[in-house]
Image: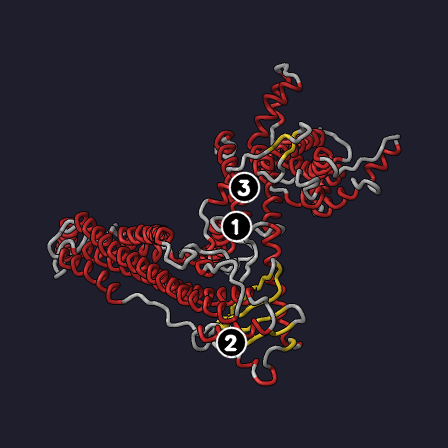
């Protein structure tokens, strides 16, 4: 029996219960918060909104300020580079008119050095005789003064000139700008060394180099504007918090203040960038006009060739020596092109800052609506579980997600072997790679004799071949694997374990070894397949000389590798089917075919469909067999999408194009897997 309470104890219990009930009612009446205190109703959500606006606006403005600083720094470097290139190209023009070597070149360099900023130096190398023709470098004075033959220690100078010659000849032969025709190198003292080829009568006969003066301090955005766009919205929000009591209205007001602060800074940034672009063009145009006048005087003084006429606007060029078009050939600012450049710059900056605004809005709503508080509570409550999964999440982030998203980002660039050192923003081309891949429908054409000639590099031809390759291989693998599984599932089959081991060996061996063995078996002269054909009086085939026979070699190899997997999956599923189903079917008079169609196939479906999906994905990307057996021969006709992407990346060195190619492959396989899984519903619970 429970002990009896005394009267005093009963009174204490009743008082305690009344106190608890009153405390609970007070909590309900204040929305779950203890009443009293100086905070008052609504104080927590006001604080959350203010903190959310502070963090969102501060983070977005800090990033925007950094982006503006980076853009201005890039403009400063670009301005200095353009001025240096103008000086280099002007000197290159005069040296070419002087014949590339001899006293005339030395006279030009001696006169032209007065046009260069303090701290600059120039030299001219002539390939004929491996000669230093002229130089104003400090180390080329006294006993080492020009003209003289280059010393052994100066071989890098000659090698640089030969690289420039090879670049000019390669670009000329291919009719494209593929290799840089102006090299730049950072010097230890903070200067930069620019090198350009000297052409006379269409041949590269030498090289001219310019060591620039140290770069001036880069342009920087003002901090006062950033602070103003940060503090003013916060002050308005803080004042409104004492007036506005409703959380939704306060959040809406903070969103407006965020848009006003960030939008104002965006307008300020775009105006700053536009004014700097115009200032750069004006400065470069003034330099071109001054140098053009001096070049005319030098040409007249040294009696240099006056034809073709000087076009100073062409001196303002990129590292492929292509005129930028921002100034006219006469050296005037090309307002139309400059306006288009400013519009393009504003558009790109606007998109970047618009994305930044979306991020800031998400941060504001996440914090202001209480999402951060709930997330922190959840993490604290389940901190042990999060601690356990943290290493796996970090590994997935570093090894899977970062490479995946970097590859997608790379697909929007023109990254190749020759511009890997440039920032992604400098080689950004947007959707051009995807348009080039998916918009090329030049699959086949008619030759002069009327025959059909296929473009084996076309994406749609390669996709068609890949689909044929996948369907045929999966069909062979499923058919042969299921047939062998049915045979091995026969009750009382002798030596069944031996058969299982032998039939699984092709899958157990490394597939690249199997691929090389089969490649040797189809060798035209020494292959065992042709030996067998000759034994029966036939002629050996050149298996890799036609698309059809080359495809058959890969099909045979991959068929040999693919059936064991399907056999193992099918055999495992067959052994799980109850024998009672077959006994009942036999009692009802069902034939073997009816039993197979009504019992075996439906029972195999949950196991076979996922296996077929996996097999399709594996075969679609079966790199080793195509790469090792057919090597795409003849003429890339037996390439599949993944090997084609590999060759675009590591044989043609078009990394951005290959990344876009790979992204398209991923999209195709993702779409197939989702559709197939939804249609079959094989992975869903019954």
Q: Residue at x 59, y 23 (%)?
A: 599
Between 110 and 269, the residue placed more toward the observer is 110
Q: Residue at x 37, y 72 (%)?
A: 217
- Figure check: 92 above or below 436: below
The local secondary structure at tag 2 comes to: helix
Between 314 and 510, the residue placed more toward the observer is 314
The local secondary structure at tag 1 comes to: helix
Where residue 110 is drawn, which disc sits there? 2
Q: Is residue 362 left or right of residue 207?
A: left
Q: Position of residue 542 (x, y in %)?
A: 79, 37
Q: Residues within 10 Å of mark 3 (few under 14, many from 20)?
A: some
Circle 2 or circle 1, nearest the eye:
2
Marks 2 and 1 sit apart, C-alpha to C-alpha, by: 46 Å
Residue on which disc 3 sits? 665
Between 194 and 544, the residue placed more toward the observer is 194
Q: Residue at x 60, y 43 (%)?
A: 642
The local secondary structure at tag 3 comes to: helix
Residue 60 seen in render: no
Where residue 252 is drawn, which disc sits there? none
The answer to which image quadrant residue 128 occupies is bottom right
Q: Position of residue 324 (x, y in %)?
A: 44, 56
Q: Position of residue 494 (x, y in %)?
A: 77, 32
Circle 1 or circle 3, nearest the eye:
1
The answer to which image quadrant residue 612 occupies is top right
Comes first in the chain, label 2 or label 3: 2
Comes first in the chain, label 2 or label 1: 2
Q: Residues within 10 Å of mark 1 (few under 14, many from 20)?
A: many
Residue on which disc 1 sits? 656
Comes first in the chain, label 1 or label 3: 1
């Amino acid at each position: 029996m429970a002990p009896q309470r005394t009267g005093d104890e009963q009174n204490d219990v009743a008082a305690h219960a009344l106190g608890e009930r009153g405390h609970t009612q007070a909590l309900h009446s204040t929305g779950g918060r203890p009443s009293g205190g100086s905070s008052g109703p609504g104080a927590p959500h006001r604080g959350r909104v203010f903190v959310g606006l502070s963090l969102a606006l501060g983070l977005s403005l800090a990033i925007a300020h950094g982006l503006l600083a980076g853009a201005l720094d890039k403009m400063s470097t670009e301005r200095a580079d353009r001025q240096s290139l103008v000086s280099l190209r002007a000197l290159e023009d005069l040296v070419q008119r002087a014949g590339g070597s001899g006293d005339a070149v030395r006279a030009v360099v001696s006169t032209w050095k007065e046009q260069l900023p303090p701290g600059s130096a120039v030299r001219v190398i002539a390939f004929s005789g491996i000669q230093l023709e002229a130089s104003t470098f400090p180390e080329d004075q006294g006993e080492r003064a020009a003209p003289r033959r280059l010393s052994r220690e100066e071989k890098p100078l000659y090698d640089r000139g030969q690289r420039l010659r090879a670049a000019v000849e390669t670009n000329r032969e291919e009719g494209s700008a593929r290799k840089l025709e102006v090299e730049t190198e950072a010097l230890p003292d903070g200067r930069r060394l620019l090198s350009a080829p000297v052409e006379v009568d269409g041949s590269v006969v030498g090289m001219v180099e310019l060591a620039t003066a140290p770069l001036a301090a880069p342009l920087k955005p003002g901090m006062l504007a950033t602070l103003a766009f940060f503090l003013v919205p916060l002050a308005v929000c803080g004042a409104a918090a004492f007036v506005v009591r409703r959380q939704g209205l306060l959040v809406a007001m903070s969103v407006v203040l965020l848009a006003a602060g960030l939008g104002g800074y965006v307008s300020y940034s775009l105006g700053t960038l536009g004014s700097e672009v115009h200032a750069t063009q004006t400065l470069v145009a003034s330099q071109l006009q001054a140098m053009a006048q001096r070049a005319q005087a030098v040409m007249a003084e040294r009696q240099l060739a006056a034809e073709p006429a000087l076009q100073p606007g062409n001196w303002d060029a990129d590292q492929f020596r292509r005129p930028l078009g921002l100034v006219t050939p006469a050296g005037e600012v090309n307002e139309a092109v400059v306006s288009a450049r400013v519009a393009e710059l504003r558009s790109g900056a606007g998109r970047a800052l618009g994305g930044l605004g979306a991020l800031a809005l998400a941060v504001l709503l996440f914090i202001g609506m209480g999402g951060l508080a709930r997330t922190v509570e959840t993490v604290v409550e389940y901190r042990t579980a999060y601690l356990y999964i943290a290493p796996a999440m970090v590994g997935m982030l570093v090894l899977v997600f970062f490479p995946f998203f970097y590859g997608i980002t790379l697909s929007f660039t023109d990254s190749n072997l020759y511009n890997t050192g440039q920032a992604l923003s400098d080689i950004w081309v947007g959707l051009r790679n995807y348009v080039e891949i998916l918009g090329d429908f030049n699959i086949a054409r008619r030759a002069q004799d009327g025959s059909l000639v296929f473009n084996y590099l076309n994406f749609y031809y390669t996709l068609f071949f890949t689909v044929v390759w996948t369907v045929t291989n999966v069909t062979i693998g499923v058919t042969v694997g299921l047939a062998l599984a049915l045979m091995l599932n026969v009750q009382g089959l002798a030596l069944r374990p031996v058969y299982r081991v032998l039939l699984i060996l092709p899958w157990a061996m490394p597939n690249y070894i199997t691929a090389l063995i089969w490649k040797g078996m189809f060798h035209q002269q020494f292959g065992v397949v042709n030996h067998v054909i000759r034994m029966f009086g036939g002629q050996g085939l050149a298996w890799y000389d036609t698309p059809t026979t080359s495809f058959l070699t890969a099909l045979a190899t991959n068929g040999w590798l693919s059936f064991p997997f399907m056999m193992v999956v099918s055999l495992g599923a067959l052994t799980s089917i109850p024998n009672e189903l077959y006994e009942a079917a036999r009692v009802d008079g069902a034939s073997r075919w009816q039993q197979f169609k009504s019992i075996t196939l439906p029972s195999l479906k949950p196991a076979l469909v996922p296996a077929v999906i996996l097999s399709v994905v594996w075969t679609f990307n079966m790199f080793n067999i195509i790469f090792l057996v057919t090597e795409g021969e003849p003429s890339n006709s037996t390439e599949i999408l993944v090997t084609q992407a590999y060759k675009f990346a590591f044989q043609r060195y078009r990394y951005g194009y290959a990344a876009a190619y790979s992204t398209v492959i991923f999209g195709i396989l993702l779409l197939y897997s989702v559709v197939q899984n939804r249609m079959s519903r094989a992975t869903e619970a019954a």
